[in-house]
Amino acid sequence: MPEFLARIGTSDGSILERTFSAEDEKALRADLQAQYLVLGIRRKSTLAALVPGLGPKRGIKMKEFLLFNQELASLLKAGLPILSSLDILTERRKNPVFKKALIEVRDRVRGGMSLSEAFGEQGDLFPRIYCSTLASGERSGEVANVLHRFISYQKTLLTTKRKVMSALIYPACLFVLSIGVIFILITMVVPKFVDFYGDLGADLPLITRLLIGLSTLVTDYILVMLGVIAGLAMAFRAWQRTDAGKLTIDRIKLRIPLVGGILQRFSASRFVRTLGTLLAGGIPAVSALGIAGRAVGNLVFERALIEVERKVREGSSLWQALDDTHLFSDIAIEMSRVGESTGALSEMLINVADFYDEEIDTNLSTLMALLEPFMLIFMGMIVALMLLAIYLPLLRSYAQAGG
């Protein structure tokens, strides 16, 4: 019996997403409407049920979300009411997921719910920091200003992330190209030399025998190997989604030579920038710590920052709690201490984030300067060894014939 994912509203006002089995969508809707308010029903993908993450994705691109917020801030600054602004912006959305979410937000606001609460009801579709930023703007009556602050914050994060990804494109392309060359040599070039080596009748060097064995294994069992690789990839992806898998992978990322330091600085920069933005918006320190800690995107940092949040709630100073994690640089700790003592913590945290971003740029430049020639030399040596293994028997044969 097929499964459906239904979004329903209960009598106490809660919005839930649950899985139901039914003959078809029409029958399920009829059954649910007798007890709940049905907000939406969609059939679950069989592939998505077997392999989490392979079904249709429910999400909104950050670029599209920032454009919406820029338009919303402009309309609010021009004096247009929130409901009228949402009406205008909802009609212009082309993304069906985004448009549906905005319709639900607009309906809840029309029903008396605050804008921040209405966005928060959408679950993980919108960043938690966004809902908290809106709440602070509603309390101060400066929603347009806090939206501009949120846009600036996200643009800075996107710029830093784009720099990291751009720096890795060339090495990744070089690696893929090298793997392709090696695969062609193993599957197409080496097999053509096997019969020729048999006609020579001479003992083959060890390196040539190893290369022939590898070529035979790959060409004879290519489908089996591809199936095993696909199975391992699916198993790894499923394990990666567990808490233990996420924690292990995030821990390994931070320990990779050269790259780990950049990833650690990126996580630290994201945390302090998020925390500074929230504090500047009037969010209480403990609440801001909880939100910022969960926005880092690295489970090692998140676990450590949960402990920071607990210590600050119990009365510890922020700089001391951060120092105990051993995840932040000395200058970041020192600037945080100065910010706490002078009452300018939010500004100081933004400065710390800017300092981290400068370090990331410097380290990325150094990494690229080392990585590109290293990869060229390493992959060149691999290809050279393969060519040596192919032609070494021929060179020996010619040498013996000449002697």
Image (cartoon, rainbow, N blue to C red):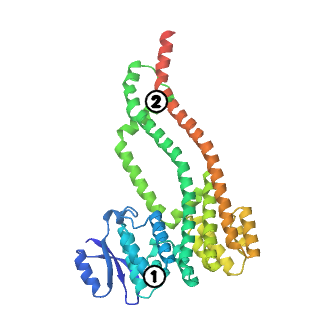
> Which numbered disc, 2 or 1, marks the residue that appears first in the sequence?
1
Q: Residues within 10 Å of mark 2 (few under 14, many from 20)?
A: some
* Residue 39 or residue 73, whichever sits in front: 73
Tell me the residue at 47%/81% (across/down).
115
Q: CA distance from mark 2 to mark 1?
A: 77 Å
Residue occupied by mark 1: 81
Q: Amino acid at mark 2?
A: Arg
Tell me the residue at 53%/78% (across/down).
143
Query: CB atoms at circles 2 and 1 under 8 Å apart?
Result: no
Residue 51 position within the rendered picture, expressed as x and y whole percent measured from the top left:
38, 62
Residue 347 position within the rendered picture, expressed as x and y whole percent measured from the top left:
68, 70
Q: Is residue 199 above or below residue 306?
A: above
Tell me the residue at 59%/69% (across/down).
302
* Residue 63 or residue 283, whichever sits in front: 63
Q: Is residue 68 above or below residue 167?
A: below
Q: Is residue 240 visible?
A: yes
Q: Is residue 341 left or right of residue 245?
A: right
SS for dot 1: loop
Place residue 200 in its image quadrant: top left
Residue 396 position within the rendered picture, expressed as x and y whole percent measured from the top left:
50, 18
Q: Is residue 3 left or right of residue 267?
A: left
Q: Can you tell which mark lies on residue 209? A: 2
SS for dot 2: helix
Q: Can you tell which mark lies on residue 165? A: none
Residue 231 position within the rendered picture, expressed as x and y whole percent measured from the top left:
39, 54
Please tell me whether mark 2 or mark 1 is closer to you in this view.
1
Q: How many marks?
A: 2
* Residue 358 or residue 197, whichever sits in front: 358
Q: Is residue 48 above or below residue 203?
A: below
Q: Is residue 248 visible?
A: no
